[in-house]
Image (cartoon, helix red, strand yellow):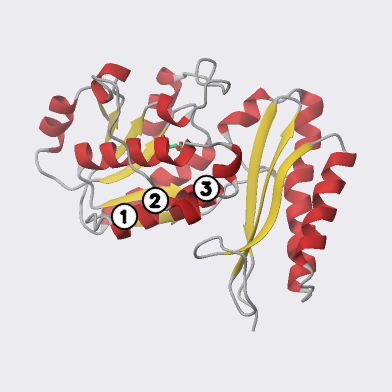
Amino acid sequence: MDIVSTAADLRAALAGQRAVLVPTMGNLHAGHLALVQQARVHAGATAAPVVASIFVNRLQFAPHEDFDTYPRTFERDCAMLREAGCDLAFAPPEPELYPEPQTCTVQPPPALADILEGRFRPGFFTGVCTVVLKLFNLVQPQAAVFGKKDYQQLRVIQAMVRQLALPIEVLAGETARDADGLALSSRNGYLTAEQRREAVALSRALRDLASAVAARRSDWATLEADAMQGLRLRGWQPDYVAVRRQRDLAPPAPGDALVVLAAARLGSTRLIDNLELAAAS
Ligand code: PAF
């Protein structure tokens, strides 16, 4: 696996080949590696190289968030990417991606980006879309893989690609989970041993909510409020628990394919998770 840190070296390494891209912020775990393997399979059909980017994107962090302390584990990340069959790692230093203040930004569709995560992390999706568009422009991939763990991010990027007519296929990767059901996340590393044991309650709350919805309960507001209260009683501070339509995260109508989503803080660590429900028959 080659490692490049500048746009010029990236272009030279790709030599016009249209790669399959896996954008990451590093601090990789098995969930990222599954996305790289998915990219590998997709690339296999076209003999395209697999590129993973490693870049902690300041633009998507609010001033009070964990940009400065976000774990930077570059050597370990590269070893994991190599092992997973990645061909090229693109790890630009900040001045390479942002040589001047990034005042030109992407405004994602407000109806999709200002709800749920966007409500609690204003500007987050502008930061994500801006760096992802920039990575797309630099790598010019034929396809890019995003995990369903960040479900709203996936939908926002799909909307950006569609509305800006970017010639890129967006592939969705399933959420990787630990044996007890906790969704893998770089931020799980912030949890104490006791919090780690408790953390599974978030995916359980979503499973219970999904079961109630699948059992055709449609008093969603009550179910959401009950799930939030259940988490509060266990010591969490939930931001939201929501039943939404899969395709655009709008409040659902009967017959829509649904997803349940949650974000909650355990101590100082904010975790998100979601579960898709099979469409009702
Ligand atoms: O999901 C992430 O790790 C980040 O939001 C992304 C897509 C790499 C953009 O910085």
Q: Give the foreground label among 1 and 3.
A: 3
Q: Badge 1 local density, few (<14 within 10 Å), some, or many (20+)?
A: some
* Relative to 268, 133 lies left or right: left
Quadrant placement of the N terminus: top left
The residue drawn where x is 49% and y is 56% is 111
The secondary element bearing badge 2 is classed as helix
- The reply to whether the residue tagged 3 has its Cβ within 8 angstroms of ligand 1 is no
* Relative to 174, 94 lies left or right: left
The reply to whether callout 3 and callout 2 are in contact (CB within 8 Å) is no
Measure the C-alpha gap from mark 1 to mark 3.
18 Å
Q: Position of residue 219 (x, y in %)?
A: 79, 69
Which residue is identified by label 3?
Answer: 114
Q: What residue type is labelled 2?
A: Ile
In this view, the residue farthest toward the right is: 233
Q: Which amino acid does label 1 sit on?
A: Val
Q: Where is residue 199 in the image (x, y as percent from the top left)?
A: 75, 37
Which residue is identified by label 2?
Answer: 157
In this view, the residue farthest toward the bottom is: 281
* Relative to 270, 160 lies left or right: left
- State how many labels appear: 3
The reply to whether callout 2 and callout 1 are in contact (CB within 8 Å) is yes
- The reply to whether the residue tagged 2 has its Cβ within 8 angstroms of ligand 1 is yes
Q: Which amino acid does label 3 sit on?
A: Asp
Which residue is identified by label 1?
Answer: 161
